[in-house]
Amino acid sequence: MKSASRTVYLTDMDGFEFESLCKTIFEQLDYGRVELLPPVGDGGRDLIIHDQQGKTVVECKHQPKTSIGRPIIQKLHSAVISEGARKGIVVTTGKFSRQAIEHAATLSPEIELIDIAMLRDLTSRAGMHIVTDQESAPIHTYQLLGTEKINGFTVGHLSNKIVSHPATVKGAYSPQRTDILLRPVYRIRYSIDAEFSTSIGVVHAERSMGQFFIDGSDGKVISEGAADYFSSTPIQNMLRWDNVSSNTIASDQPFKILASTVKEIAMDNIIRRHTQTVRYSGRNNHTYSKECTPPKKDIFISDISQEYLPEYQIDCLLLGRAQQLEFANNGTSLIHVLNDSTSICPICKEHVNQEKRSLCNECGLITCTKKYFFKKKRHALECDVCGKTLCPSCASYASRMLLMKTVLCVGCANDFTRRGKRVKTLIRA
């Protein structure tokens, strides 16, 4: 049995979506090759399963408040015979009447009946969890980090970004406060199977699968960076929220957006993502363009699961100067950085996310390592004698040949002064 990793809301499904769900279930359980028939004029046949023993005709009935009666069984049995199939299956989100059950037991070829109870078992074995309007969906979160790992990730990230000498970033680091926020999100998984035609035939086919996240508190699609990071999370790293220890220091925000509303938001977003204009040549050799917008009937939302994404906010000191790092973690050895106060140079006010920074070992200021020779100043300096990393405000210099200067830290500048050499303070940036 597969662990339930997908949540399906039956209440918000229409009949076509339920047929697609059944197709997915049978495929996941290796029933065979599953063919989804066109919705118009199906003659009591929604799916046909092809396996080594022959064909199985499937009728899907999304009728949670209605009992399936004998006429549906008779109709499917006729379809099985006309199709030359070995058996038939009726799947319903409701129940079967006593007359339907008794009649199915007398038929040959066989007609198998799957009601809501059996459907739950099938979906569970297929790695899904179905939810009706009388139930709440399970909410998952991720293995939360302990204090030691939080500090380890923080020091590791800062050490990778910051140059410091002689003090190491680890030696300069002093944690002050850690907060964990559990961000409510809906994970959306979907597939599209759409064709677009003109008088010359099919000019474009959109067949793809994808997933994205919607914030459960405001309904906005979360950033692609965070979505890509959590999309690859191993299922075993996730926990049921009701299994998370209540003595954690995490705080959670409530889900304010209903699943039915999320489905509408998701559908609109999927349509926008996959709408494109294609160019094609007509029979007169003229070039035309056509906007291809996937219709809702060709989009199948296979999963809307609720999750809490852990976000960690760390307030710390680096050589006594306050800094802040925010990151998300999905239970793996990598983090996704959301905000890093050290990435903004206080001198030029520029973001330096992809560049190294320098920690002044005199005052703790963190500057970018860009060099502005044309401005006759640099934001990150090193003492030419001992190699201590400095900021312009803490550096001094002694004149060398012509216009050359020897950059000095406070200690080396005092040593130069004792030896009778002239030392000047660098011009502040």
Image (cartoon, grey):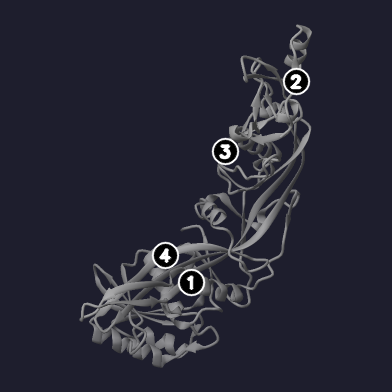
* Tag in front: 2 or 3: 2
Point out the tag, 4 or 1, that comes first from the N-terminus: 4
* Farthest top residue in view: 419
Distance of mark 1 from mark 2, alpha carbons?
62 Å
- Is mark 1 in CB contact (under 8 Å) with mark 2? no
Residue 197 shown left or right of residue 349 in the figure: left
Point out the tag, 2 or 4, that comes first from the N-terminus: 4
Badge 4 density bin: few <14, some 14–19, many ≥20, Cα 10 Å: some
Point out the tag, 1 or 2, that comes first from the N-terminus: 1
Q: Looking at the picture, which amino acid does disc 3 mark?
A: Glu
Residue at 67 percent of width and 40 percent of height? 345
Point out the tag, 4 or 3, that comes first from the N-terminus: 4
Res. 209 mark: 4
Which residue position holds label 2?
424
Inspect this view and state whether residue 306 appears. Answer: yes
Res. 272 mark: 1
Residue at disc 4, secondary structure: strand
Res. 355 mark: 3
Residue at disc 2, secondary structure: strand
Residue at disc 1, secondary structure: helix
Residue at disc 3, secondary structure: loop
